[in-house]
Image (cartoon, helix red, strand yellow):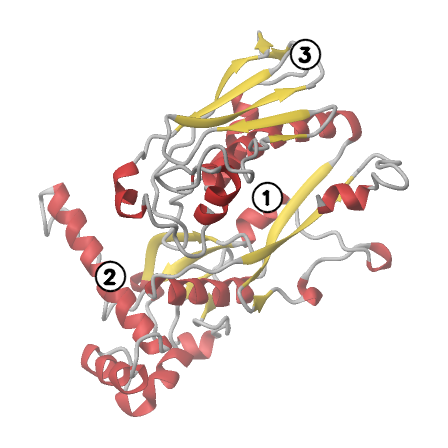
Amino acid sequence: RISSTSPCRHEAMSTFGQVFRVTTFGESHCKGVGAIVDGCPPCLALTEADIQPQLTRRRPGQSRLTTPRAEKDLVQILSGTEHGHTLGTPIGLFVPNEDQRPGDYKEMSDIPRPGHADFTYLIKYGNKASSGGGRSSARETIGRVAAGAIAEKWLRGTYGTEISCWVSSIGDVSLPESAVPRGEGGCLVGWTRAQVDEYGTLRMLRDPATFHRVGEAEVADADERRKANIDAEVAAEDAFLKLVGVHAGASAAGVAEAAKRGVAAAAAGAAEALRAMPCYEDWQGGVYTHDGGRLGEAELKGVDLASWRTDELLPLRCPHPPTACRMATLIRQVKVEKDSIGGAVACVCTGVPAALGEPGFDPLGGKKGG
C-alpha cells in the first residue's frame, strides 16, 4: 500500500461547474450516494417527481444485459426546497444503497482488479475503497443524473431546450447513420426521449422447445418456483448461445443439441436454425433473428409467437430494432464469457441558447470535451 505521505497523493475532485455547481458524493457500497447542487435559481417548481423518472431510466437490474445489482434508486430531496419550489440555496439529493455487499470484494481488497480503476486510485490517492469501485463505480453517476434532471427542467422552462440521447454503438455493432431521422436541409434531429425508450426496447423470444415458464399450478412454493424458472432460463440461454457459436465446438455440439431438442433439423446446421429462429420482438410486433434480420409472414408461417414470447424486456435504448437485436446478442455472448463490453451514445440538444462558451481558452467544444 502506498504511504499517505506519497508525493502522488492528491485530493479527489468531485465538483463540476461554476455557476451551476454539482458535487457528487458516495461510494459503491456505502450507505448511499447523491449530490449537492449549488447555484440553482430560486422559485423553480421542484419535487422528487421531477428527478425520479431519470433515475428510474438509469436504474440497474432492468434486464439480463445489465448489472444484476438490485436497487430501487429512490431519490430524496434533503434541502434547498420548500413547498415544492427551490429556495436558491444548496439542494441536497440522496439515494440509499440498498444492495450493499462489501463482502463480495473481500478477496480483491489487496489486489487491484484488471480493467478497473483500483490501481489508478491507489497510485494517485494512496488509498482506495476496499469494496466495489468506490468513487469509480457507476453508482457515482446517480448524482450526475439527479443534478442533470434539475438543470434540464430549468433549461426547458427558460429556453425550451430539449435533450435526447440514444445508444449508437456497442462493441463493433454500430447504428447506421442513415437510420437517424433528419430534418430540413439534412439536419440531424434524432428521436425524442419517449421514442428512444419505446423503439429501443425489445422483447425476448425463446423457443418453447427449450424454455417453459413454471407456473403456480406446477410448483406451489414461490421460492422453489423461482428457482425452477431461473434454471429454465439458464438452460434456454445456454441452448441459444450454443447455436450462436459462443461455446467451443458450437457448430457440431449446437447442431446435435438443436436436433435433440427439436429447435431445428440437425441437417440444416446451426446457421440454418438461427436464420429462421425468432429471437426478438420490437414495439410494433416486428420479429427479428439474432443478427437483426426481420422475419416476414412466410418465415413465420405456422409459428405460434404467443408460445415464444417471454415477459423479459431489453431496454437497449438503440431506437433502430435491427441494430438493437445485434447489440443484444453481442452483449449476451460477452456476458456468458464473464466479460463486459463498452459502447457509445449520441446526443441531440435543440433550443440551446445562443452564444454559449468563450473565445480562446473556454470554448463550448472545450467544455464538452472536458
Question: Residue 351, position in %: x, y?
Answer: 79, 38
* Circles 1 and 3 in contact, beta carbons < 8 Å: no
Where on the picture, by quarter, is residue 234? Answer: bottom left
* Of pointers 2 and 3, the one earlier in the residue sequence: 3
Q: Residue furthest top?
A: 83
* Of pointers 1 and 3, the one earlier in the residue sequence: 3
- Per the rendering, the mark at residue 299 is none
Q: Residue 7 versus residue 69: which sits nearer the camera?
A: 7
The residue labelled by disc 3 is 88
Question: Residue 348, position in %: x, y?
Answer: 71, 47
Horizontal side, residue 271 vs residue 248: left or right? right
When the figure is inspected, residue 237 is found, relative to residue 165, above or below; the finding is: below
Where on the picture, by quarter, is residue 352? Answer: top right
Q: Residue 163 versus residue 21: which sits nearer the camera?
A: 21
Secondary structure beneath label 1: helix
- Per the rendering, the mark at residue 234 is 2
* Of pointers 2 and 1, the one earlier in the residue sequence: 1
CA distance for labels 2 and 1? 32 Å
Question: Residue 139, position in %: x, y?
Answer: 46, 37
* Circles 2 and 1 in contact, beta carbons < 8 Å: no
Q: Total marks drawn? A: 3
Q: Residue at x 59, y 26 (%)?
A: 23
Mark 2 or 3: in front is 3
Secondary structure beneath label 3: loop
The residue labelled by disc 1 is 194
Q: Residue at x 22, y 85 (%)?
A: 256
